[in-house]
Amino acid sequence: MGRVPQKLDRDERRRQVSEAAWRVLVRDGLEALSVRNVAAEAGLPQSSLRYTFPTVASVRERAVALVLERLLERVDAVEDGEGWSRAVLAQLLPLDAERRTEMEAYLALGTAAMTDPALREGHRASQDAIHDVCARALAALTGRPPSDLEVRELHALVDGLALHVVRQEPGADAGWALDVLDAHLARVGA
């Protein structure tokens, strides 16, 4: 029984370290992502961090995995019912500070994934999950399995909206992104 709290503490520490890595990425850029800087941001001794994350690569991999975990947690928390498709798709957009930080970290790590095979796998898993969310949203909206083209179209729209929103000044009105999403869903659901 004594091992469960230790496991929970370890999982919580991994989450805290991943969030610290996001903050370093967003504030200082990918070049600043080091075990030393992440340890300082997390308020942990570097030696303690190295036990869980021995390399910068392991910090990066965990940071991208946490983006996916958070996304899936938010999607799973959306209750079934009318409006489910829109509510789920809105979770993919950086409409608050938390999702904005996640998106900024995800974009930085996604760029790094172009040349880092270990990150590429995590990034691909995230893209696959978003594709799946789009497919589920379309199926719920239309009552039929969507075509691959329809799913890719929605995925591209959501990705584009997310990119445009995250490139706005923090705090700028992003309601227009939901308006665009609503217009698309109205056309698809008609």
Image (spheres, grey):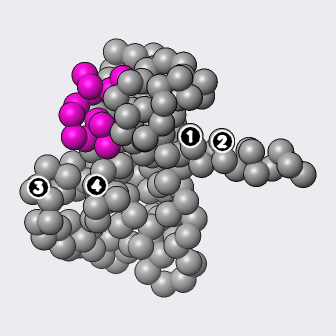
Q: Is residue 60 positioned above or below 66 on the image?
A: above
Magenta span: 23-34
Name the dominant secondary structure of the magenta segment: helix
Position in image of residue 128 (x %, y %): 49, 41
Q: Secondary structure at mark 1?
A: helix
**Which residue does the numbered mark 3 point to in the structure image?**
168
Of tags 4 and 1, the one toward the viewer is 1
Question: Which residue is pictured at 34% across the width and 77% down the height?
Answer: 190
Task: Estimate how packed mark 4 is, as few (under 14), some (14 to 19) or many (20 or more) residues with alpha carbons within 10 Å.
Answer: many
**Which residue does the numbered mark 2 point to in the structure image?**
10
Position in image of residue 62 (x %, y %): 51, 34
Q: Amino acid at mark 1?
A: Arg
**Which residue does the numbered mark 1 point to in the structure image?**
14
- Tell which circle, 3 or 4, labels the residue nearer the N-terminal end: 4
Q: CA distance from mark 2 to mark 4?
A: 26 Å
**Which residue does the numbered mark 4 point to in the structure image?**
100
Instruction: Please indicate, yes or no, whether residue 132 appears anywhere in the rendered image.
Output: no
Asked whether, in this view, residue 48 is left or right of residue 167, the answer is: right
Task: Estimate how packed mark 1 is, as few (under 14), some (14 to 19) or many (20 or more) residues with alpha carbons within 10 Å.
Answer: some
Q: CA distance from mark 3 to mark 4?
A: 10 Å
Q: Amino acid at mark 4?
A: Arg
Asked whether, in this view, residue 149 is left or right of residue 159, the answer is: right
Labels 3 and 1 touching (C-beta < 8 A):
no
Q: Secondary structure at mark 3?
A: loop
Foreground pick, 46 / 63: 46
- Tell which circle, 2 or 4, labels the residue nearer the N-terminal end: 2
Position in image of residue 6 (x %, y %): 74, 45
